[in-house]
Amino acid sequence: GQQVMQIPQYQHVQEGEDFTTYCNSSTTLSNIQWYKQRPGGHPVFLIQLVKSGEVKKQKRLTFQFGEAKKNSSLHITATQTTDVGTYFCAAPKAAGNKLTFGGGTRVLVKP
Amino acid sequence: NAGVTQTPKFRILKIGQSMTLQCTQDMNHNYMYWYRQDPGMGLKLIYYSVGAGITDKGEVPNGYNVSRSTTEDFPLRLELAAPSQTSVYFCASSYGAGNYQPQHFGDGTRLSIL
């Protein structure tokens, strides 16, 4: 079945540094969603990308959808301790009203 | 606005026991979902519903049952609990089809089967 793979699985970041996490699919996606889950919390919707090459920004977070609509990235600038958590990408399954979630990138910030 | 409410928050069951995880939403969303999240892993879809009276299986439905008698409520039933069902269970809802609309999650139910 369709899968979305996220890399890296873990990301240790020094506070103030930038990092990027990636989401890859073997098939073309109609859209992709990103969620953030704080430790002990529940996933919270961040953004949805629909168009080829689309770039959206939310303060220090930049989301990009690849030109071929098979991959996406999340870039965080000047990481803060509030960025700690797991970031999931999610993409529609080929059929039905469902999402496939990636395994997530677990972000730890070193002060 | 409460959003998606799940009860209980924590539960310990013995092997072979049964229980119902409750989920209710007050956003008048038609679409509702049940996921499980094992430690350090992503979310796996158990069951979903596109409206009252309609349910369908997700990736990992075995050992679970659901019903959707009202728009607001989507309970998940565990029959004959097994250790493999130890997990965190999240209920979610969306205004439209969850593959195109944001999903809103409850706080989760942390379930241990011993």
Image (tube, rainbow, N blue to C red):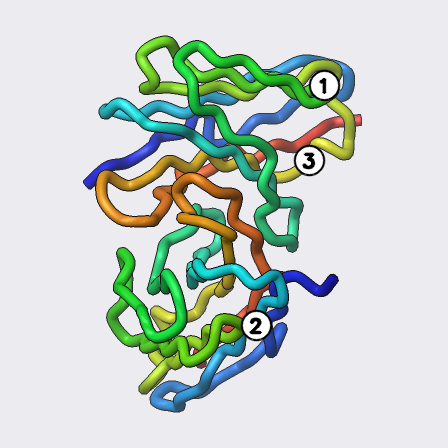
The amino acid type, in three-letter code, at marker 2 is Thr
The amino acid type, in three-letter code, at marker 1 is Arg
Task: Determine if marks 2 and 1 fall on one subunit.
Answer: no
* Residue B52 in the image: above or below residue A34: below
Residue position for label 1: A60
How far across and down, in percent of the image, does residue A59 sit? Answer: 74, 20
Q: In 3D space, how far apart are the residues under numbered discs 2 and 3 (Cα atoms)?
A: 29 Å
Q: In 3D space, how far apart are the residues under numbered discs 1 and 3 (Cα atoms)?
A: 14 Å
For the residues labelled 2 and 1, say whether their Cβ atoms are less than 8 Å apart. no
Label 3 marks a residue whose chain is A
Residue position for label 2: B24
Q: Quadrant of residue A65?
A: top left
Residue position for label 3: A84
Residue beneath the point at 77% across and 31% down? A81
- Numbered label tally: 3
How far across and down, in percent of the image, does residue A104 sit? Answer: 47, 37
Q: Secondary structure at mark 3?
A: loop
Residue beneath the point at 31% across and 68% down? B55
* Residue A5 in the image: above or below residue B69: above
Task: Determine if marks 2 and 3 fall on one subunit.
Answer: no
The amino acid type, in three-letter code, at marker 3 is Val
Screen quadrant of the C terminus of chain A: top right
B22, B42: nearer the viewer: B22
